[in-house]
Amino acid sequence: MSVCPSCEEPLEEADRFCGACGYDLSSAAARSAARDAAPDTAPDPAGEPASVEWPAAPDLDSSDLPAPVHLPTDLQGTDSGGSELPAAVRFDTPPADDDFRLAAPDPRTASPEELGAATSPSSRTNSSRGYPIPAGTKLCVACRSGHVDPDGYCENCGHAQPRERDHMEQELGAVAAVSDRGLRHHRNEDFFAISSAALPDGSAAVVAVVCDGVSSATRPDDASLAASRAATEALHEALPRGTHPQQAMHESIVAAAEAVNALADEPETAREHKPHQNAPACTFVASVVTKELLIVGWIGDSRAYWVPDDREAPAARLTEDDSWAAQMVAAGLMSEAEAYADERAHAITGWLGADAYELEPHTASFKPDRPGVVVVCTDGLWNYAESADEMARVLPADAARNPLHSAQVLVGHALDGGGHDNVTVAVLPFPVPQSGAGSA
């Protein structure tokens, strides 16, 4: 070697290592001798697999024509064992195993007959496993063919299903209510209960209870549900016995508070948050309407309004908020406009819950001198129609005859205004139409 193969430093004939980089010249010489001694012959065909000559695509010329498109079948060749490749893979009949059968027809391309067959009771089976789906199982709102798993997702298309409480409507002839999740919240934490009860004289009393879960508390949706149901049950126990409606309203608020308090005593495994967080809580407003009396009860900032059928007569707000703003106005420290413009305006000072300061049910009884309607609602509505006059302007003129439509219009007004909160409203005509009172 005349130069080092590593650094190309000139070498002497007797050098065994490079003086510049220390490269081992004896190992390089051995590798060079081995290459020189290797036979220049092909391996024995009997001992090595046959080489495969893969076809090459034809050379392209230099013209401006686009390159031709080559399909796999255009280039014939052999596999690694030397046999011919098939021209194409083809199945003339479907495979016998149905593991790969689609769970349901594609709703975008399937005909109505195919969708009907897929959703008929005789065909409703779990296609991925082949077992029948029990009768009454909820179908997916998106594909209308897959059934909904307990976690709220479609087994077929994976679509998340809307919660049942996202939008609720109910009508009992003489009373109607609507509740909506709104446009900003991820769930509806409001709840309502409407019903009618028979009084001892045979006349009917119409009941509406509306509760708004406190979002900063644990399980506010459970709190509003428990309070609404407990209050309704208490009213239905007291009114038929002849208890004065205002006293029955007081007892119903106490029953609702006990039901919400009980949620805080449930096992830790039933809580969705850590135990040290706020106990379940909600606000409360309710109304009982008879042929002569109008009773309201409340705790928190949910409200009740009176709107006469004769819109020339004044409307009125029947409740006073348990809130920071109301306290400032009552103490004469601020005007109503100033107080409700403050960022602390909606901080409530009264609610139902185990961590409430003390339970102070508010009740009031009225004897209107003319027909009209009672609007019972959460702040998700009155934020967009705060004064009684504003509420009267939004409420349809035929509210007493069409309470459900009127409730829908009021909820729509809140959604059109921004829908920043859950919206719940009940509409009760006064006096109670004796032919229109529904059953409990």
Image (spheres, helix red, strand yellow):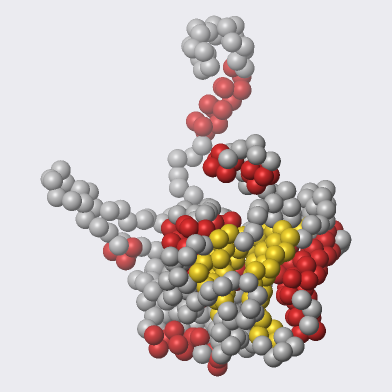
Q: Quarter of the image containing the C terminus?
A: bottom right
Question: In the image, what residue occupies the spot 12% across and 45% down?
Answer: 63
Q: Which of 92 and 179 lies nearest the eye of the viewer? A: 179
Q: What is the total number of numbered labels drawn onto the structure image?
A: 0
Residue 179 vertical placement versus 54 (above, below)? below
Residue 188 shows up from this direction: no
Relative to 209, 99 lies left or right: left
Which residue is outermost to the front? 369
**Residue 17: % across, % down:** 62, 12
When the figure is inspected, residue 109 is found, relative to residue 388, above or below; the finding is below
Residue at 80%, 63% (x, y): give it. Answer: 257
Q: As rendered, which of 124 and 379 lies closer to the eye?
A: 379
Looking at the picture, tell me which residue is in the foreground, 355 or 317: 317
x%, y% of residue 37? Answer: 52, 33
Position of 20 with respect to 351 (left or right) is left
- Residue 77 lies, with reference to residue 197, above or below; the image says above
Q: Position of residue 219 (x, y in %)?
A: 73, 59
Residue 200 can be seen, yes or no: yes
For image coordinates 51% across by 17% down, the residue present is 5
In the displayed structure image, the side of residue 367 where residue 251 appears, left or right: right
Q: Quadrant of residue 158?
A: bottom right
In the rendered view, does 218 fall on the left or right side of 168? right
* Quarter-of-image position of residue 130: bottom right
Residue visible at 47% across and 57% down? Answer: 390
Q: Quadrant location of residue 433?
A: bottom right
Q: Position of residue 105 (x, y in %)?
A: 45, 79
Which of 313/127 is in front? 313
